[in-house]
Image (cartoon, rainbow, N blue to C red):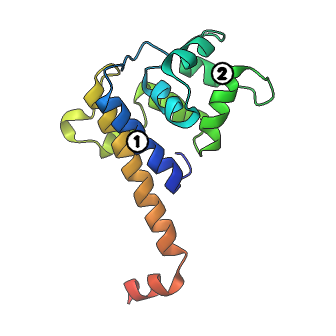
Amino acid sequence: MAVASIELIAVLRSTAQRIQNSPNYQWGHMGACNCGHLAQEITHLSKAEIHQIALGGHGDWSTQIREYCVGSGLPMHWIIGELLALGLNNRDIENLENLADDKVLKAMPNNQRHPQRNKKLDVVTYIQCWADLLSAELAVAELLSHPKAVESIIL
């Protein structure tokens, strides 16, 4: 799973809110899908700009992440590089697009553990649960970085 950071958690939360409030969510549109909305938050490009850039590559986000090359100079690879720089890895991006991370799915409410890609509520819940998991991970890491705090909990 992604490297937990305050910045990544904030971007995930704002992406979930963006999707929830947007009339422009569309899973089949490279700039208005799950990853497209995240890319909008990070790059400040519009959905149309991201979609146009993505058309220069092959396939959906899952395919394009597999073809990612850091030094290619391709605009889509720059967008992917921005996602990776935030702490995501290739699998995180693919999982976000397909709503497929097992840890996130287990954290979702029972009635939403089989999310549909083009259902906004499912996508929003998935991203919020992912942010919650990363937030908990970050809190544990912070606690463990203070030995005296851990000692007082154990005693």
Q: Within 10 angstroms of label 2, few (less than 14), some, or many (20 or more) residues?
A: many
Which label belongs to residue 129? none
Residue type, label 1:
Ser
Pinpoint residue 151: horizontal percent, then vertical percent: 45, 87
Which amino acid, by three-letter code, is at mark 2? Answer: Met
Q: Residue at x 69, y 25 (%)?
A: 77
- The disc, 1 or 2, on the residue closer to the chain's N-terminal end is 1
Q: Secondary structure at mark 2?
A: helix
Residue under pointer 2: 76
Task: From the viewer's perspective, tell me whether residue 18 is left or right of residue 56.
Answer: left
Closer to the eye: label 1 or 2: 1
Q: Residue at x 56, y 19 (%)?
A: 50
Q: Residues within 10 Å of mark 1 (few under 14, many from 20)?
A: some
Q: Nearer the viewer, residue 101 or 146?
A: 146
Nearest the eye: 45 or 7:
45
| Secondary structure type for disc 1 | helix
Which residue is at 55% across, 21% downward?
A: 62
State how many labels appear.
2
Image location of residue 153, percent across then percent down: 38, 83
Q: Is residue 56 visible?
A: yes
Disc 1 to disc 2, how far (Cα)? Answer: 22 Å
The residue carrying mark 1 is: 14
Residue furthest to the right in view is 71
